[in-house]
Image (tube, rainbow, N blue to C red):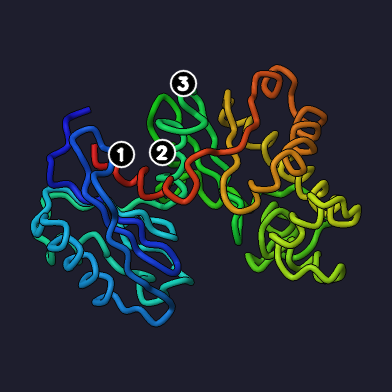
Amino acid sequence: MTAVPADAIAVDLGGTSVRIARVGVDGHLLGDAVRRAVGRTTTRADVVEIVVDACRELAVPHPDHVAVAIPSFVLDDQTMAECPSIPALTGSDLGGLLSDATGAGRVHIFPDIACAALAEQRLGTGVGSSRFVCVALGTGANAGAVVNGMPVATAFGCLGDAGHVLVDPDGPACPCGGRGCLESITSGWALARDGAALGLATAAEVTRAAQAGDVRATRLLTRAGVMLGRACATWSAMIWPDTIAVAGGLSGAGELLLAPARAEMHRVGAPYIVDGIRLMTATLGDEATLVGAGLLTT
C-alpha cells in the first residue's frame, strides 16, 4: 500500500452522530475526533457543512484524502442506497459533494460494516487472521469480511446485507420483507420484541436479566445464539474464515450468546470448515467504524 498523506480525514457518519478525525501516515487516528449530532431531519447540505467545519477545526481545511463510513450501502454508480437514519442522503453522491466542498483529491465512501470489519481484523480480535468475519449485532444485524487484509465486497461495497441470511424458515417476519432471517431473531429490536412478554423492554434488559439468572431471558439469548450459529455456518461455507468476531450491543451478552452459537455452528456446519473457526467477542467497541475508515485512507 502507498503511504497516506498526513492530511487525510476519516468520517464516521452514524445514525445519530458524525465523528471526524485526522489520520496519520499509517492509517491510525490522530488526536480526538470532532463529534456533531445528526438525525432524520439532517440535510445533505448539513452533512457537508459539518465535515467542512470539522476539517477546519482539525486544521486540515483541504484534505488530500477523505474516507467516509456510512450507515448504508454504496451503489454501483457511487451513490448511496436507502439511508433510513438520514433520509436526505438516499440517492446522494456524497463523495462528489464532499470533494467539491473540501477540495479533497480523493473521497471514498464505504459501508460502515466494511470499516468495522477492517478495524477489527487489523487492530482487534482479528489480528493475525487471514480470513476474518465481523458480525455487528446492534439494533439490527449485519456482517463484513476481510480476506488477506482487504474488505470483501460482494455487493454494494461490502458483504451485502448479510444480516438477512435465512436461519429459520418458520421464523418471524422481518421489516426487510423476508421471514426468519438472522436480524428477525438475533438483533436488538428482535430481542426487545420477544422480551416485552417478560416485562423486558430492551435487548440490554434481556441480557441483564439473563446474567442475573432469569431462565426465560436466558432462553431468549440461547435462541438468538443458535440462530447466530446457523448464520456463521452459512457465511463460513462461502468465506472459510479462521476467526469470527461478534461486535455491537448484543456482544455484551458474552458466552450466553456465543456458547450456543458455537454449539450450533458445529452442529450444522461442515466440520472441515467450522472446526477451524474461532468465534469470539470483538474488542474495539464503538471506535471500530471510525478506525476502519482511517485505515481505508491507505
* Upstream in sequence: badge 3 or badge 1: 3
The amino acid type of the residue labelled 1 equals Leu
Estimate the x, y position of residue 94 in percent, counting from the top left. Answer: 27, 64
Q: Nearer the viewer, residue 169 or 130?
A: 130
Asked if 244 appears above or below 177 in the picture, the reply is above
Alpha-carbon span between mark 3 and mark 1: 16 Å
The numbered disc on residue 128 is: 3
Q: Secondary structure at mark 1?
A: helix
Identify the residue position indicated by label 1 in the image: 295
- What residue sits 26% from the left and 37% below the top? 27
Residue matched to label 2: 119
Residue 282, horizontal then vertical, whole percent: 55, 38
Image quadrant where one finds the C terminus: top left
Up the image or down, 158 lies above or below 201; here it is above
Q: Amino acid at mark 2?
A: Ala
- Which quarter of the figure has residue 3? top left
Among numbered discs 1 and 2, the one appearing first in the sequence:
2
Q: What distance separates the C-alpha of mark 2 from that of mark 3?
A: 12 Å
Residue at 67% over, 21% down? 273
- Left or right for 66, reference 234: left
The local secondary structure at tag 2 comes to: helix
Res 50 quadrant in image: bottom left
